[in-house]
Amino acid sequence: MRKRLFEQQLRKHADRATPDVREAIRSNPRYQAHIEATRAQRRSLPRRLFGSPKFAVGSMLFAVVLLVVFLAPSPEEERVAASAYFEFNPAIRIDLDEDDRFLGQEGINDDGEAFLDELGPLEDESIEAVIEILLDHAVETGRLSEKNPYLLYDVTGEDDERLDELSRQLEERIPEHVGDRIPDFAMMRGNQHAASDEEREDARHHGIGVMRLRMIETLKDAGAEQSFEELKELSVGELRKLLEDHGIDERPGPPGDMPGGHGP
Amino acid sequence: MNRLDQAVRAFKKGDEAAFDTIYELTRSDVYYTALLIVKDESLAEDILQETYLKMVDNLSTYQERGRFRAWIRTIAKRLAINAYHQQQRDLSVDASQTGENLFGGVEDQAEDRRYLEELFQSLDATEQEIVIRRAVLQEKHRTIAKELDLPIGTVTYKYKRSLEKLREAAAGKEGEET
């Protein structure tokens, strides 16, 4: 208790010791431009909506359009033909359409969400650019480094032939892009296939992705001495090594599935 | 939604008063993140200002997922790393400004700064960094160990020992004042 109180006091002193540069920020043209732009937006919005004598008809049409938009199935969701999953502690998913064009991204653990937040929107980028942006940021921020040179990945979707081609391209391009910065870079295929909601939630609860969770659970099933918490702290490379030590060369699959199997 | 997220959303919509809340809730995260890298208070102050301006420039790209603090710290970190490299290239830089102590080198200090500077004199550079990271930035021991390339046990021990030293120094100061 005494320690915590002292820490709080220290934090308070440190906070108060931080210089106050608000005035300098506020007088900067960049700050003023933001304020002006948002004010202009606020001013123009009510005028457009309420200033018109045709407001009632307009708002009704607007409501109808909204209703149609919300009731119609999302075209973007329908267009997702394949997903690529990456884990290097942040766990993320990238969705592609049937022509392997980039559709969207999602962080599937807390680190993954933070990682994507740092990048901002990627929507207008090509899939090649998205992969390069992700890798560059992972290297710049030390999430991929000489100490942590492992990237776990998998691709899921319905067309096996296309998935094989996508996987081949990723395995070719990714090491090419980061290999000169991380000489020991190693890319390994995990198994994300048929992940249930329960598995996803379980993995998220532990701050990891499903592929890593499956590696750990396979090791536990194989009688690994380490606790779950200890295994969770290991890198993907170390987990792979342990799996090999236990005679498991294949990719650990969903619970109840044979190792490496893609399930039904 | 917490107070910080609410303020960010309001500021995005043009509520200027929300900027004060954002600043007050994140200034020490930004400042000490920069200070740990550049180890120069006046440069850290410049980075503090530039970080908020970059935040304003890029606010439209920030996706509201309750990760604002991490986001703004990343901006500060990038700016500080750039400034650090510039500092290394700049041969005219005064070596004393990149020395062992995080605090000091700024005249006309506020009372809290002076207090911290005096307390931190009892710690070496690594201990100072561990205390700032753990107590101020509230990083996990594991993260600190990774960043400083130290075993986690060493970080835990050093942190505990540093707090003891700081407590002794604070008690000594109180004794002097009474």
Image (cartoon, helix red, strand yellow):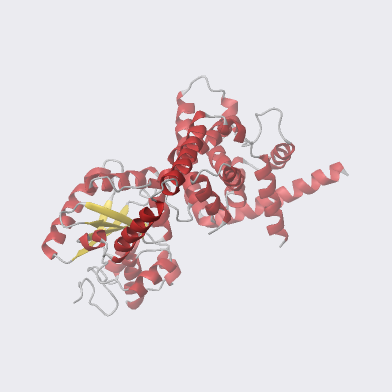
Using the rendered view, name the quadrant where residue A93 is placed. Answer: bottom left
Kindly give the residue lying farthest to the left in the view shown.
A161
Q: Which residue is drawn at the image coordinates 53% and 29% (left, top)? A: A28
Name the spot of residue A222 as percent of width and height, x first. Answer: 32, 76
Q: Which residue is drawn at the image coordinates 70% and 41% (left, top)? A: B116
**Above-or-below relation of B62 to A261:** above
| Residue placed most toward the observer, A30 or A228 | A30
Using the rendered view, name the quadrant where residue A72 is placed. Answer: bottom left
Using the rendered view, name the quadrant where residue A225 is placed. Answer: bottom left
Name the spot of residue B97 as percent of width and height, x first. Answer: 59, 28
- Left or right relative to A222: residue B109: right
Name the spot of residue B167 as percent of width and height, x first. Answer: 74, 50
Asked if residue B126 can be seen in this view, the reply is no
**Above-or-below relation of A232 to A177:** below
Kindly give the residue lying farthest to the top in the view shown.
B92
- Left or right relative to A240: residue B82: right
Q: Which residue is drawn at the image coordinates 22% and 46% (left, top)? A: A128
Kindly give the residue lying farthest to the front in the view shown.
A53
Name the spot of residue A130 as percent of width and height, x first. Answer: 27, 47
Asked if residue A199 can be seen in this view, the reply is yes
- Location of the C terminus of chain A by quadrant is bottom left
Q: Which residue is drawn at the image coordinates 24% and 73% (left, top)? A: A259
Kindly give the residue lying farthest to the right in the view shown.
B178
- Left or right relative to A230: residue A105: left
